[in-house]
Image (spheres, rainbow, N blue to C red):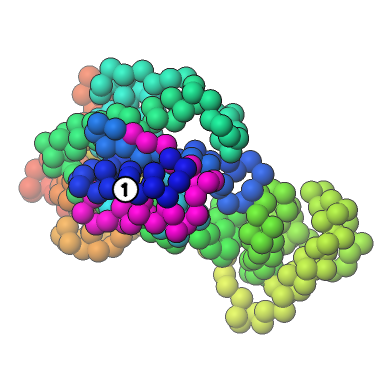
Amino acid sequence: MNDREGVAHVAKALSPRTIVAFDTEFLREKTFYPKLALLQVADRENAWLIDPLALSRDEMQPLLELFTDPGILKIAHAAEQDQECLHHSYGVLAAPLLDTSIAAALTGHGDQIGLGPLLRKLLDIKLPKGHTRTDWTKRPIPPAMAEYALGDVNHLVEAAEMLLSDLDKAGRRDWALSLSAMYTDPRRYEPDPDAIATRLVSGRSAGVQTYAVLRELVHWRETKVRKADVPRRWAAEDSVLLGLAAAKPNNLEELSHFRGLGPKLLEKEGKLILDAIQRGLDIPPEERPSPPRKPQADSDEAPAVAVLKCFLNLLAREHKIPARYLIDTDDIVKLLRSRFSNIAEMRESGLLKPGVSDEVGEVLLEVLNGHRALTFSKGQVKYIEVPSGQAGRKNLSSR
């Protein structure tokens, strides 16, 4: 569809549905923002290709209203980039949302399974071969490419219905929806320069002054790449920013010795880079933010961390879910040091991923409070209940 009437027709056909699938094709090799080139939408019986290059936002409005209709569940597979396309192109995000990649992981189909393998497992359907290096902005779209694009949504509603049924049987529908909802938060698609600087120093030894300079350099790069709509690496690689923050050059001559900053960039941006470095240096010591530090287990805690990781992996295997859906690795030490007396406290801590406290909280609470222990049986790890007289004598750590 490439006209107002076509979009209105599709929106009218989909509006009575309770479940609608969507997918996108886009280009990003030479831009900071994704360039939406094709939008695919479908219900259980029909699928359509929408040409966003030929349509204004006003002409797309009926479909955008459908994407934000709270009464229609939107389905996408590995939804993050599709949502980013909608957010950048139209300022909307599809919600409510079910990501079939997440739903598949919570129903025992494997972590981060591709759409092709998932449809083969669920529906015995083989998708057309991919067009990973296709320029989707070229028109007209060849029939083979159109068939490929439609294949991504043709059977997605049917697959989602099967997954939703399995989620209901396992009591995990709300869990899947809460995890999928992280892709409906606009903050996810508006990168925070300070968060980027935090990620860059994660696991590194960086002083307070170096971190302050790095934050200013990241702000410089983010401003440049967004304004010029070019990839971050075209301005400066992460490693270059880290090197500049550590060395803190104070003139163009010193700046010119850094690899990764070409002559053209230095000519146009050299002064701005130096200004960014100076802004970081000018922050009074008492106002400089401290670089974030990952919580590190001390020598006494290290064995307990290893045991807790083993417990978490065992829980993930038993419940047929990816271990990464339980907790971020960086939070395991915090979990070990926490003192929870009930599930509500565990949930309120925010250490566990959404839905985890309800799914495995009781067992995890028993582990943390010394009421369950690990044992080996026939070469496999299992956990056992600790006799009531011994429970609590020795917890995972000596907290």
- What's the residue at 31%, 52% (across, down)? 66
Q: Nearer the viewer, residue 36 or 32?
A: 36
* Image: 179 above or below 253: above
**Residue shown at the point (39%, 56%) measured from the top left:** 61
Q: Is residue 235 left or right of residue 80?
A: right
**Range of the magenta residues?**
47-73
| Residue 198, horizontal then vertical, whole percent | 55, 60
In depth, the one of 1 and 369 nearer the eye is 1
Farthest residue toward the left? 388
Image height check: is 274 above or below 132?
below
| In front of the other: 164 or 56 | 56
> On the rendered structure, is 191 left or right of 164?
right
- Name the quarter where the N terminus is drawn: top left
Q: Is residue 266 visible?
A: yes
Q: Which residue is mark 1?
A: 11
| As drawn, 296 above or below 46 | below
Q: SS class of the residue under badge 1?
A: helix
User: As drawn, which residue projects farthest toward the right?
Assistant: 253
Residue 157: quadrant of the picture: top left
Q: Residue at x 66, y 61 (%)?
A: 227
Viewer-proximal residue, 331 or 38?
38
